[in-house]
């Protein structure tokens, strides 16, 4: 399966607490899978592994260096190190806002959808990291990264 991964600009290593939002403007499936549910992952990946990533083969959350949430066929998942854990809450989609809160001092990554938290934050998140988004092979999406703030 081919996945498309996009990485945002690198966050300065001096930033310890950062928050940004991902706004989902469009989300759907194309081709033979037009009736299938789109798969989209939102999270972060460690900068130490970026140079070795082949963007159309990398699957966010499948290694120990990335953390994400996924919307897909059965709902909402929390993904890290190749494990996908089903969480409470519905899929996210068009019009939804995913808020990503990274605290490298506490080593946590919290993600919420439309200001609702459906699962506990990831623990033991090691930085530095960059924001990342991964779409399934038949998924088309229009997303914006906005309101990045740090303290």
Image (cartoon, rainbow, N blue to C red):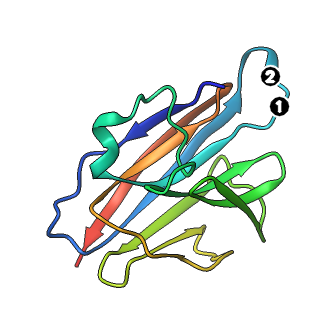
Mark 1 Cα-neighbour bin, 10 Å: few <14, some 14–19, many ≥20: some
SS state under label 2: helix
Q: Considering depth in this image, is 16 or 26 the residue closer to the camera?
A: 16
Q: Image height check: is 38 above or below 88?
A: above
Residue at image point 48% right, 57% down: 64
Q: Give the number of the disc on residue 23.
A: none
Q: Residue furthest bottom?
A: 106
The C terminus - image quarter = bottom left
Horizontal side, residue 21 vs residue 50: left or right: right
Kindly identify which residue carries mark 1.
36
User: Considering only vertical position in the picture, is 140 above or below 17?
Assistant: above
Residue 139: x %, y % from top left: 65, 30
- Residue 80 in which image quadrant: bottom right
Question: Where, quadrant-wise, is the N terminus in this rendering?
Answer: top right
Q: How many labels were placed on the picture?
A: 2
Q: Nearer the viewer, residue 98 or 104?
A: 104
Q: Where is residue 15? Give x, y as percent.
A: 20, 70
Q: Position of residue 55 (x, y in %)?
A: 43, 30
Spatial separation of the CA atoms under disc 1 and disc 2: 5 Å
Secondary structure under the numbered disc 1 in the rendered image: loop
Residue highlighted by disc 2:
33
Query: On screen, 117 above or below 23?
Result: below
Nearest the camera: 114 or 8? 8
**Crowding near the residue tagged with mark 2, few <14, some 14–19, many ≥20 C-alpha atoms within 10 Å:** few
Q: Position of residue 76 (x, y in %)?
A: 73, 59
Residue 125 appears left or right of 41: left
User: In the image as oriented, which residue stretches furthest toward the top?
Assistant: 31
**Labels 1 & 2 near each other (Cβ < 8 A):** yes
Image point 36% across, 84% down: which residue? 106
């Amino acid at each position: 399966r081919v996945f498309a991964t996009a990485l945002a600009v690198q966050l300065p290593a001096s930033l310890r607490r950062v928050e940004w939002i991902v706004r989902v403007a469009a989300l759907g499936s194309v081709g033979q899978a037009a009736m299938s549910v789109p798969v989209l992952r939102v999270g972060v990946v460690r900068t130490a592994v970026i140079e070795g990533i082949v963007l159309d083969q990398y699957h966010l959350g499948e290694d120990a260096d990335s953390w994400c949430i996924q919307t897909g066929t059965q709902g909402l998942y929390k993904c890290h190190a190749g494990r996908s854990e089903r969480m409470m809450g519905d899929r996210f989609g068009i019009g939804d806002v995913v808020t990503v809160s990274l605290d490298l001092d506490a080593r946590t990554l919290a993600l919420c959808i439309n200001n609702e938290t459906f699962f506990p934050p990831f623990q033991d998140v090691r930085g530095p990291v960059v924001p990342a988004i991964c779409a399934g092979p038949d998924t088309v999406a229009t997303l914006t990264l906005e309101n990045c703030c740090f303290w």
